[in-house]
Image (tube, helix red, strand yellow):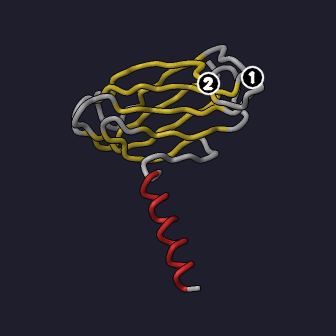
């Protein structure tokens, strides 16, 4: 019995390490650290056709190029597909860098948003946020 528990705990620990750099939650914001070529991802339920995403860096190693992708389930396959994508540079700490998406396909669906750090050798710690946009 102890060996089985040990094997299960080892498996859980390995899985946690494998997926430790991706945060998947049903919320509208998360604080995370994003190194080069790593992502921060989460799902917000019941979003509208107009969305805003925000990155606010608390600490960073220099200007960072970030790719932000918006995904929704757009057909009967149940697979998330890209419905919006932008690249922008985060150049300062404690400043909100906003991206506005309008008329996103499947306007009332759950939305997955993914930010990817595309600057080699860089790291950033901050808050990542998505919400319905009212312009």
Which residue was labeled with disc 1? 75
Numbered disc 1: secondary structure: loop
Which residue was labeled with disc 2? 81
Between 56 and 33, the residue placed more toward the observer is 33
User: Is 123 placed left or right of 5 in the picture?
Assistant: left
Q: How many marks?
A: 2
> In the image, what residue occupies the spot 64% across and 22% down?
134
Location of residue 106 by image quarter: top right
Decide: few, some or many residues near mark 2? Use Cα within 10 Å; few <14, some 14-19, many ≥20. some
Q: Is residue 128 above or below residue 79?
A: below
> In the image, what residue occupies the spot 47% across and 51% down?
19
Q: Closer to the N terminus: mark 2 or mark 1?
A: 1
Q: Residue furthest right?
A: 76
Cβ atoms at labels 2 and 1 below 8 Å apart: yes
Question: Residue 2 placed where, x, y %?
Answer: 54, 85
Decide: few, some or many residues near mark 1? Use Cα within 10 Å; few <14, some 14-19, many ≥20. few
> In the image, what residue occupies the spot 24% across and 32% down?
120
Q: Residue furthest bottom?
A: 2
Distance CA(mark 2)–CA(mark 1):
9 Å
Numbered disc 2: secondary structure: strand
User: Is 104 placed left or right of 39 in the picture?
Assistant: right
Location of residue 70 by image quarter: top right
> In the image, what residue occupies the spot 59% across and 85% down?
1
Question: Residue 110 placed where, x, y %?
Answer: 69, 33
Question: Residue 45 placed where, x, y %?
Answer: 70, 38
């Amino acid at each position: 019995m102890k060996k089985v528990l040990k094997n299960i705990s080892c498996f859980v620990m390995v899985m946690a390490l494998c997926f430790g750099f991706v945060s998947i939650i049903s919320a509208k914001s998360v604080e995370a650290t994003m190194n080069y070529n790593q992502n921060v991802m989460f799902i917000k339920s019941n979003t509208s056709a107009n969305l805003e995403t925000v990155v606010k860096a608390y600490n960073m190693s220099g200007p960072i190029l970030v790719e932000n992708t918006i995904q929704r389930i757009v057909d009967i396959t149940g697979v998330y597909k890209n419905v919006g994508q932008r690249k922008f540079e985060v150049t300062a700490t404690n400043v909100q860098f906003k991206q506005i998406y309008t008329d996103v396909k499947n306007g009332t669906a759950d939305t997955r948003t993914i930010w990817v750090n595309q600057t080699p050798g860089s790291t950033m710690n901050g808050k990542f946020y998505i919400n319905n946009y009212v312009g």
